Amino acid sequence: MPKSTITPTRMVLNQQKARLKTATRGHKLLKDKRDELMRQFMEVVRRNRELRTKVEEGLTEAFSALGVASAIMSPDMLEQAILCPRQSVELGISFKNVMSVNVPVYDFKTKTADAGDIYPYGFAQTSGELDDALGKLSAVFADMLELAEVEKSMQLMAQEIEKTRRRVNALEFVMIPECQENIRYISMKLEENDRSSKVRLMKVKDMILKESLEEKQAERAARATRSK
């Protein structure tokens, strides 16, 4: 029996068939979308692992060099050396569509094109380890930015995958079976009504034939009476 009360008519049957056709097509499209999202999501996950490893290694090297520099230089000298940076970064953001998911794309540009502007101090009073630390931090910055982009993309894609999975399940386990059950119910009722109509017609036909036969017998009896 259908879950909801429906009128078993041919118009409703056609509506249910059209609904089932649309739901089946939507289920296939959503399933394809989910599978493609999963494939791209796994690629992003692999890229995230690579970037995270690379960023962690770069930061470890940079902080190691900075630790050596802080051991060689006095705290006041180290603070004075990096107190007034000459280089600055402007961050830009745009979006690209990945299977109807708007994932961010980060980019940046430095205030000046001179690579040496990352060192805001003279080299006479500082150690080479501080140069190494700033150089490594500068080199890992682009990877850190890409890592942030990838992790945000992972989050958005995971949310879309979950949303698509719920829709696929709703169509597969609720809407499509309900439409199929409604179609079976209406078809059964229409067939039952057709059989009932045929039985009624046969009974009416028998009654008409019986009445006709009785009328003919009455006429014959009347003729026989008159002829006597």
Image (cartoon, rainbow, N blue to C red):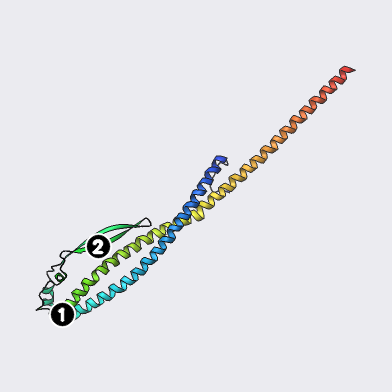
Label 1 sits on a secondary structure element that is: helix
Residue 202 falls in image quadrant? top right
In the picture shown, does residue 183 fall above or below 165?
Answer: above
User: Does 14 sit left or right of 202 as displayed?
Assistant: left
User: Does 112 sit left or right of 25 as displayed?
Assistant: left
Density class for disc 1 (Cα within 10 Å; few <14, some 14-19, many ≥20) is: few
Q: Residue at x 15, y 82 (%)?
A: 72
In the picture shown, does residue 30 fall above or below 64?
Answer: above
x and y, in percent, of residue 42 in the image: 39, 66
Density class for disc 2 (Cα within 10 Å; few <14, some 14-19, many ≥20) is: some
Work out which residue is located at the far front of the displayed protein and give it: 113
User: Does 110 sit left or right of 184 as displayed?
Assistant: left
Label 2 sits on a secondary structure element that is: strand
Amino acid type at mark 2: Asp
What's the CA distance linking mark 2 and mark 1? 30 Å
x and y, in percent, of residue 73 in the image: 13, 80
Q: Residue at x 22, y 76 (%)?
A: 62
Number of marks drawn: 2
Q: Quadrant of the C terminus?
A: top right
Q: Residue at x 19, y 81 (%)?
A: 68
Q: Residue at x 49, y 49 (%)?
A: 22
Amino acid type at mark 1: Gly
Q: Which residue is mark 2?
A: 107
- Closer to the chain start, of discs 2 and 1, is 2
- Report if the CB atoms under discs 2 and 1 are less than 8 Å apart: no
x and y, in percent, of residue 178 in the image: 53, 50
Tell me the tag on residue 128: 1
Residue 197 falls in image quadrant? top right
In the picture shown, does residue 223 fall above or below 36?
Answer: above
